[in-house]
Amino acid sequence: MANVISDETIEYVGILAKLELSSSEKEEAKSDMGRMLDYIDKLGELNTDGIEPMSHVFPVKNVWREDVVTNGDDRDNIISNAPGEKDGMFEVPKTFE
Amino acid sequence: MQISEYTAVELSKAIKEKKVTVKEAVEACLAVIKEKEPTLNAFVTVDEEGALKEADEIQKKIDSGELTGPLAGVPVAIKDNMCTEGLLTTCSSKILYNFVPTFSSEAVLNLKKAGAIIIGKTNMDEFAMGSTCETSYYGPTKNPRNPEHVPGGSSGGSAAAVAAGEVPYSLGSDTGGSIRQPASYCGVVGMKPTYGRVSRYGLVAYGSSLDQIGPLCMDVTDCATIMEAICSHDIKDSTSVERDDNDFTSALVDDVKGMKIGIPKDYFGDGLNSEVKEAIMKAVDVLKSKGAIVEEFDLSLVEYAIPTYYTIAAAEASSNLERFDGIKYGYRTEEYNGLHNMYKKSRSEGFGPEVKRRIMLGSFVLSSGYYDAYYLKALKVKALIKKAFDEAFSKYDIIVAPAAPTTAPMIGKSLSDPIAMYLSDIYTISANLAGIPGMSIPCGTDSKGLPIGLQLLGDCFNEHKLIRAAYAYECETGVYTKQHMLNGKDGE
Amino acid sequence: MGKNYETVIGLEVHVELATKTKIFCGCSTAFGGAPNTHTCPVCTGMPGSLPVLNKQVLEYAVAVGLATNCDITQYCKFDRKNYFYPDNPQNYQISQLYLPICRNGYVEIETENGTKDIGIHEIHMEEDAGKLIHDEWDDCSYVDYNRSGVPLIEIVSEPDMRSADEVIAYLEKLKMIVQYLGASDCKLQEGSMRADVNLSIREVGAKEFGTRTEMKNLNSFKAIRRAIEGETERQIDIIESGEKVIQETRRWDDNEGESYAMRSKEDAQDYRYFPDPDLVPISLSDEFLDEIKSRQPEFRNEKMARYMEEYKLPEYDVNIITESKKMADIFENTVAIGADPKKVSNYLMGETMRILKEKEMDPQDISFKPEALAKLIKLQESKAINGKVAKDVFEVLFFEDIDPEKYVEEKGLKTVNDEGALRKVVEEVIKNNPQSVEDYHNGKEKAIGFLVGQTMKAMQGKADPASVNAMLKEFL
């Protein structure tokens, strides 16, 4: 395997992605990611100098709307799936000491 | 003829002619579902009560002449990654185990306008990540042709439900082949429209630049009819394209004389099962015999499609799935110590292994120092792949190829080797990268009786050509799905 | 302290745009709604929802860019900035990194040391976050997404400022430009304008920049000044003691007068930006830009010249009344309905500025109607009320929506023009103040002032002082 993923990398990506892996999952993730990156490295074979990265396939552009209020109070619906709620607000673990 | 043997268009005609009531149609579907679900597990949710209630309403509208279209009164199943107002939408994930959307996706609304009755939500690979329907938190779906095999994925439930006669048609979504590959494995017709044809509003995003909703159904006529109903310009989806050629049934013409068909040699090399290859070549001969001009060519870049796809799809998915955090909806872990611990535990317990694998990969390829080497590189290769298709379509009306390298694998054989699983998407993935439409229609079975899918690819917004060729093929060979059902060959 | 240090400051200024709706959905941006009543699936990050750009946001951003001498990026895109925080419902913020809408601009500031150009690195469009509400007695916080998706522009300056004075001058200048454009009310206290200060220290003459810190939570010009002074001192202390400044984000606590590092293990500051696939690129034609250019308002310098030319106002007046767009608008609207320009100007420079200062208000907060001021001036011109009464009435109309004519009538504040009544009072005053009368006759001109005052008092202020003066002279 050309790409060797370190414990630190897995730890770091876990912080970015907010995932906490068990030690066996970590080992698996290291080998999976290494193999996938080896596979992706294949793209390096292609010369892409001067090629514009293509994020959208079509030249669709300038899609916008006018500044007109179209939504009313939909709070009861919006909050209806919340695991924790109080007074129409979403409850979260304390963010501020 | 039994109700469950009708195609969608036939069923709606029978309802209009008062041979069948809408309630009878719904009850017939529910009966098949009751019978087959214990084996198949094609549904996450069956909305018996809602569908029966809706049946009465729709019947009234048909009787009063308010609803006259070709899908009025016909039951439909919706892949569980499309929001349905008031109806559980899980994406086959634990993290959305209790999520009840407060709005419906645009494609579903379009079907409802046409008088469709939602009978339930179909099982899928979790968040559409998978090619076998085995990554679902709610258990794998089985292939109705042989329950020891997978139905394909990620729209495996949608394909299986149609193949089993549980419902005349369904909606799926296709990010890398997720409609065409299960259609092929289950022996039904499936289409991934051009990116932008169908609004993505309400589709829970996996790879936003690749996702597209499309139909799974029994024959090409249904496919064209459903496409007419679901395609629309939606101002809520910035990537939705305004078109004046959504008249797909006009392409149901049994004539391919002079149609130029390209056969990409690169799709017929190592890795392609010989029985599949044989069936595809036979199908090509059928089209040739009807006057199509067939030519082999080099498409190129085929082996780069999968790494390009996994880089882009994983990157987009890592971002799209950030919103599942235990705050606004869905699963929140029981015990936690502070905010970040709550995030991590909820997400780690809520997502399955394949989803976590792709989120990790996606977060990595976007992370500081790797963006250019991986993500940007993949976007450049995507441009090259698009260019290769542009060149092909300057010479050919359509491209014909297998939908998948093999027929449906056995359950339990795929997940252990992700890259091998990813390879099953090798023929379908490029269409998503290039944004082009693709279709899979049944073209025979292998020696084990498992269906084989013929894939048709067209240039952007050239769905008409695909429908025309598929229809001509079907006219010549008969409607596979229906024959299969009438012969009662479902393997149980 | 042996060495001479220089403070290098760059600013990231967030301005909340004055659109009616949010940047990517049709929810209202109005303040004051109950929590989550201005929300929808898009601005709360519901699965399946998709953003659609509000065109007005783009127009405001371009207008600000043009007014700050920026190059407009005619092909621009939105990117996702990924980070987890509860006020950010998608856990990514839609912003612009790779192709921001404006680049390479500058504004000219004036300080005691003369004028100076402050470079603008870029301006980009993005969405605001929701609000977290904390309850001291609770182990939870609560999220309100009413502000989530409110449009912002972030104006990123070059590290061109060297002192708190320059920073304040730069902010005042930005504020004025944005207010003139009507793109925002720019209130620091209410958060519609927010400044993060990037600050580093280096020895005078050094070419390289020092390590910078970013300071957040600065809610007033006073706080900004204190934070700059505090951080400058902190960094100099670190350097003097031979240690190194750490590049970090710090939170200013204005009550304590101190800043704290906001670092955490869970905060990797790796935002994994990539183009948002849900939004399509923006490609602005020359015509689009010309159209916005043609709609640009008259800015301060043009206004000043015009006011001097058209209304013959002194430069001093013009300087004050054009300082904010709001004030200039009131001036123009009041003059437009027929009031005398100089008199309007006097009310704005005098009474209005006095009240604003006393009440620590911003010109943006002025709510009185030009019609009311015009009427007041008319009343005064026609001598229906005198200057003292007029000032009192102005103070009322500044805070309350009154019709000055009716108010004066109802409160009985009109000048008494009954000569007989006045004559009686004047006679009485002369009789009761023989000493002043004598003083006046002995050449003490001032004495008459006292007598006028006594007369006005007896008339309960409702006389025209000039008439009183004339009558007194006649009697004496």
Image (tube, rainbow, N blue to C red):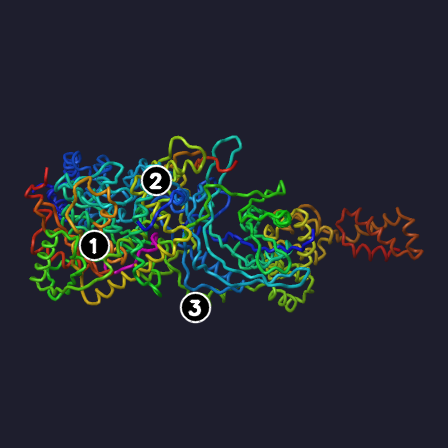
Helix or strand or loop: what does disc 3 sit on? helix
Secondary structure predominantly adopted by residues drawn in magenta: loop
Image position, residue B173 (x, y; %) = 25, 48
Residue C452 place in picture, x, y as percent: 82, 52
Q: Kindly identify which residue carries mark 1.
A: B427
Which segment did they paint magenta? B235-245
Say if mark 3 contacts mark 1, CB within 8 Å: no
Q: Which mark is residue B15?
A: none
Can the viewer see residue C429? yes
| Horizontal relation, residue B40 to residue C245: left or right | left
Disc ID at residue A26 = 2
**Between A17 and B83, the one nearer to me in the picture:** A17
Do circles 2 and 1 both sit on a common chain?
Answer: no
The circle on residue C287 is 3
Dot 1: few (<14), some (14–19), or many (≥20) neighbours within 10 Å? many
Q: Is residue B479 left or right of residue C131?
A: left
Relative placement, left or right, of C72 versus B464 is right
Instruction: Tell me the quarter of the image containing the N terminus of chain B.
Output: top left
Q: Label 2 is placed on what type of residue?
A: Lys
Chain hosting mark 1: B
Q: Chain of mark 2?
A: A
| Distance CA(mark 3)–CA(mark 2) | 55 Å
Q: Is residue C321 left or right of residue A23?
A: right
